[in-house]
Image (cartoon, rainbow, N blue to C red):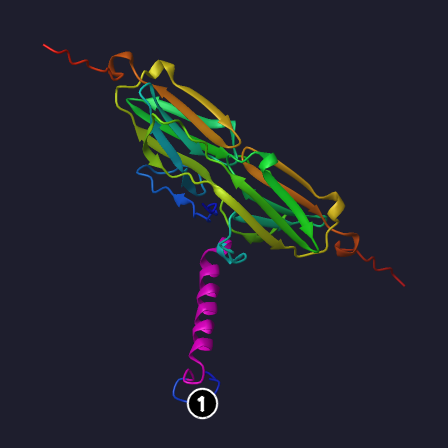
Amino acid sequence: MALIRWTPGLMGWERDPFSELERMRREMDRLMSAFFPAAAIGRAAGVFPAVNISEDANNIYVRAELPGIKAEDIEISIEDNSLIIKGERKIPEEGENVTYHRREREGGIFRRIISLPAKIDAEKVTATSKNGVLEIVLPKAAEAKPRQIEVKAA
Amino acid sequence: MAEKEMQVKEKAQVTTEGEQLKEGPVFLPSVDIFESPEAITIVADLPGVSPEKLNIDLKDNELTIEGEVDYNIGKDEKFLLKEYEIGKYYRKFALSNVIDQSKISATMTDGVLRLVLPKVEAVKPRKIEVKAA
């Protein structure tokens, strides 16, 4: 027989319907991630630009797709342990005598702050832009790097 | 006027009529298409596609843009956050025969493709003068 936690009320949700919804959301997330492993990583912040963050033993990598934005139009700064990306995407005017069939590309300003998951060495951060993809490499501070501890035979 | 702030746009995935032989998602690039009296220009966002990995094909008035993204992710990297997916780009356009297919030119800068499709001499609009009788 399955054991069910006792909760007051008929189904337990009279107490706090929102916590019940939250629990259902978490359950859905868990189910989704079982089928689509990629969706399990992080929760999109909904702020432009969308970023992918990864890490290895030495660095944290932040990548963003910023097509048509020149490197000099992107401003990157580090504050405490946050990374700030600011900039503007300019869509040049194509002249007065043109007519549009499609206009899907958008321009505008953007600013995003990202809390970094580990202490980094702000002096050694590098950023490169290639084919419209920005890559920021943030070396981890010495104390944040994993240390291998050797076990000596007594 | 206040400056417009950019919004995150989910990449549109292609639901192709043909079967994809390669694994991985395929996305529709965002495009601007505009026309001047001399030419039709297509501007497409293809972030991560190098000019060598871009294929532009023109056959029977059908223009296909296909781009593969260069992955340069280290093999020890673990993802902490994934807000966008990486995949191929694919989009097809039907051209009318007003295009002079021999004079099409393409340039690629910072992940943005610019395709200029000049019109044939005969279809360039002509002003017709109305003479007073």
Q: Quadrant of residue A31?
A: bottom left
Q: Amino acid at mark 1?
A: Pro
Q: Which image quarter is the C terminus of chain B in?
A: top left
Tell whether A101 sits left or right of A95. Answer: left
Report which quarter residue B15 is drawn in.
Answer: top left
Instruction: Give percent across and percent down for residue B123.
Output: 25, 16
Q: Is residue A21 above or below residue B5?
A: below
**Is residue A90 at least partly visible in the picture?**
yes
- Which residue is nearer to you in this view: B93 or A124? A124
Badge 1: few (under 14), some or many (20 or more) residues near its Cα, within 10 Å?
Answer: few
Between residues B50 and B30, which one lies in front from this camera angle?
B30
- The chain letter under disc 1 is A
Which residue occupies the extreme left position in the image?
Answer: B133
Instruction: Judge by depth and name the residue closer to the eye, A44 or A26.
Output: A44
Q: For the stretch drawn in magenta, what is the main secondary structure?
A: helix
Q: Residue at x 64, y 44 (%)?
A: A76
Q: Magenta segment range?
A: A12-38
Residue, far bottom: A8
The residue singled out by tag 1 in the image is A8
Q: Is residue B48 above or below residue B115?
A: below
The front one of B119 and B1 is: B1
Q: Residue furthest right?
A: A154
In which quadrant will I find the N terminus of chain B?
Answer: top left
Magenta stretch: includes residue A78:
no
Camera sees residue B74 = no
Give the x, y percent position of residue A51. Answer: 55, 48
Q: Which residue does the image show at 47% across and 23% down from the upper left? A: B107
Q: Secondary structure at mark 1?
A: loop
- Rendered view: A125 above or below A22: above
